[in-house]
Amino acid sequence: MASAFKDEHSGATPVQSDAVVVRFAGDSGDGMQLTGGQFTLSSALAGNDFATFPDFPAEIRAPIGTLFGVSAFQINFGSSAIDTAGDQPDVLIAMNPAALKTNVDSLREGGLIIADTGEFNQRNLDKAKYSSNPFEDGSLAKWQVLAFDISALTLEAVKPFGMGNKDALRCKNMWTLGLALWMFDRDRQPIIDWLNAKFAKNQVLADANIAALNAGHAYGETAELAGPLKQYHVDAAPAPAGLYRTVTGAESISYGLVAGAQLAGLKMFFGGYPITPASAILHHLSRLKEYGITTFQAEDEIAAICSAIGASYAGQLGVTSSSGPGIALKGEAMGLAIMTELPLVIVNSQRGGPSTGLPTKTEQSDLYQAVYGRNGDAPMPVIAARSPVDCFDCAVEAVRIAVEYMTPVMLLTDGYIANAAEPWLVPDLEGYKPFPVEFMESIPEGGFKPYARDHKLKRPWVKPGTPGLLHRIGGIEKELDTGHINYAPANHQAMTDIRSAKVNNVADSIPDQNVEQGAAGAKLAVIGWGSTYGPIKQAVRRKRAEGVDVAHVHIRHIWPMPKNMADLLKSFDKVIVPEMNTGQLKTILRDQFLVDAKPVNKVSGQPFTIAEIEAAIESALG
Amino acid sequence: MNDMTPVRATTPKDWETDQEVRWCPGCGDYAILKAVQRTMPEIGGTPENTVFISGIGCSSRFPYYMETYGFHTIHGRAPAVATGVKLANPDLDVWIITGDGDALSIGGNHTMHLLRRNLDCQIMLFNNEIYGLTKGQYSPTSRVGTNSPSTPYGSVDRPATPCAFALGSGARFVARGFDVSKNLPEVLKAAHAHRGAAFIEIFQNCIVYNKDVFEEFAAPKGAEGHQLWLRNGEPMMFGSEKSGGTKGIALDSGALTLKVVDVIDGDWKNAGVIVHDVTNRSLAHMLVEMPFGEFPMALGVLYDDPRPTFNDAVIAQNESASAGKTADLGKLLAKGQTWTVEDGHPET
């Protein structure tokens, strides 16, 4: 990726750049996520491709000025395809000493620091554990520094509105956003419209924030110093024609579930319990009641899934959602859904574990839990979304498998995907093939048997309330066909085999595994799943540009896998599997296909950088 | 249920399945099953619109023996499954079958929240003060000192009082009965007539692991002196000449508690006997806590004062929030701050 700021520049024409990575960092009360979100919107409206990475603490209002209270938002935007939030920022905007301290080491050498000196007082320096002022001790020598008193400039800008000092200083983020908009040659109007809408009930707040935004912008314009502050322009990225919007993973999953329910011709029941980072799905769906959605905030994770199972039993599409710890609590109920063969979608927005782990940080460490994490032989389809946009199709696919095979399905996403935003070419819903559910409503030829099966091994779905088809289901082993209680050895063997075969049959309905870049037979394959898609794609692209014979395979259908997977994997000389865990897909690939898959692991709570994957490719081929 | 559909008359036999009943011979569950099968025709139930949902334990096998829809779920979770069933199809008549361990130990949380929300259903808690299906461990309703495989020196923790738990959780209907009581169908009918969560504690005799633990009040001999059958609008009286005199329940206004008083020559008014009012919540609190021994066992409908149900509220909100809106997903996706790319060039 080309970097900004490498050219000497003077004059009023903005410097052209291909891509820029900007990180906004401040105290968790400084509104950095909001600032980042609005900057993202302006990037979208400028036609840039982009990827974002919100990174915030688990504490809602951590003590002011502390290192652990720093909240950051990184955006990578460019005039060509962007797949990651960027390895290293080119620009770091640090609103206080703690933000500088925790973020500066990731800044590219020669990159630009913009800092608010108004916050660099002794008290804040102490809180950030700086023994001396970094602007004075030479410790920032390898970067360009632009430090000035944003606090004072903000106070000055909002003075006419007669606000208290504390409230006035809360406009600092808009001042900074104004400066950033100037730096990257952006239109202020959409942000002004947004502020007017946001503070519609308090015009003074709206006006003050707009004044701060304008002041930051004007500061850039008039104080275009001989120093490092310059204006840059990133052209629009070429993209297929159509209507675009930004979307986060949580939004995309929610819309995908709605689309899935519509394609199935079902009403949706969503049972959820608040948990980071999954709650956003509950929030989104709660506002969509006109789509035939009932949302239920249950008393706990177990009640959330059990209520969804109850709704599926009654003939709606049951959906539940959580993150790792909540998914663990739902395990027994997933077994019930497997045993009673009811459709159910379980969304797992993974986060760092085990136990409470890292609530706001991303990880892919629930793959074992998804594939193996239940008592008994309890096979369940598992699919994984690779990006915020991909969540939509994955959610539709999860619904399809659930209703076409009468089975619970786990849809894996993660904290990074859930919170990150990217541009989305709004899909044409006409392009999705409906999969309408047919309930059994009368006694079929040969008599009614609740566990009789079709060619796919699916049992019928009968809604309570249907005359003539009364029957009982439950978690105790079922007799073949009749569904009566049956503990006989041969029956349990047969039913276990059927449950497994039914889930394996899902492979008949999914496409062959494709190769994203490169081809079967390459010297090295990089096999990924989930949110590692961006860094793997870019790393493989770069290596291939250097002439390295490397392929990228990204797996959506993790259980069962596409039918060609064995042949495909065996075609490669070497296979590496980068994952944000200690090697879970690697284990599954070794187990299922006896391939010598080598792990590449990272569990720091941060996504892979492109450079890390490149290094892994070099090392594997070295 | 559609009001226009003529109600099909059923007989108790119509509510029996072809499944072999697998409770121990002599188990109190048989009597409860019969009572329910006798009650269903009387309340005008239709088998296809009735769902029995249970957790885990001896009592939770119940759905297999009812010719209705049935769901034998997992331990403690029947209220949660029932909530999903009722919200997805409020026309179904939902009955939850549970036990003392299922409802008050592993599933205590769900029981509390179902009652608090007031889901329209009946909850039959079979209380035998023991874990039967796991072979006799003490339960959350076992009395202090209960000897069991897990408490060989006697249990030391104080038991929960199911009806007090229910009332404390916000239940709007609380009743008590016992397995072989001839009054059980009347209690079940009252529960069914109540719109909202109707909680019924049914003392059930586990003849293998906790035999005759309720004998002191459930035995036919001397029953009139040990059982206070509550009837709305009637004075709270019990006993007879045979049992040592007619007695009544009166208020000890000094101590703000109940007391037992003698009723001489039927003059209950003079004795200060309270007239049962099923809508009096304070009275219900005193009745559920009334200690047996010093007092008779309070049975029948202790409390019945309906409030709007959870399912009605959810559906009403779903409807009001949807009013005037069309479910056009394509439009929804294209909403908000969007931009159009034409020929590879964006325009805002």
Image: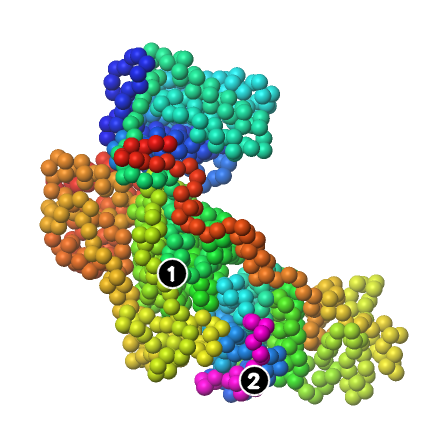
Would you say residue A45 is visible in this rendering?
yes
**Where is residue B258 drawn, in percent x and y?**
78, 69
Q: Which label sits on residue B73? A: none
**Where is residue A330 drawn, in percent x and y?**
42, 59
**Residue for point 57% across, 53% down:** B320
**Residue for point 25% across, 15% down:** A8
Q: Is residue A91 above or below residue A541?
A: above
In the image, B279 versus A425, the foreground residue is A425
Residues in magenta?
B1-21
Instruction: Give the prevailing secondary structure in the magenta stretch.
Output: loop
Position of the N terminus of chain A, as image quadrant, is top left
**Residue for point 37% across, 79% down:** A444
Pointers 2 and 1 within a single chain: no
Q: Is residue B296 above or below residue A176?
A: below
> Would residue B12 be counted in the magenta stretch?
yes
Q: Is residue B73 left or right of residue B180?
A: left
The amino acid pointed to by label 2 is Thr
Reading the image, the residue beneath label 2 is B10
Q: Chain of mark 2?
A: B
**Where is residue A101 drawn, in percent x and y?**
38, 27
Reading the image, the residue beneath label 1 is A264
Q: How is the image coloured?
A: rainbow
> What is the tally of numbered marks visible in this picture?
2
- Disc 1 element: helix
- Disc 2 element: loop
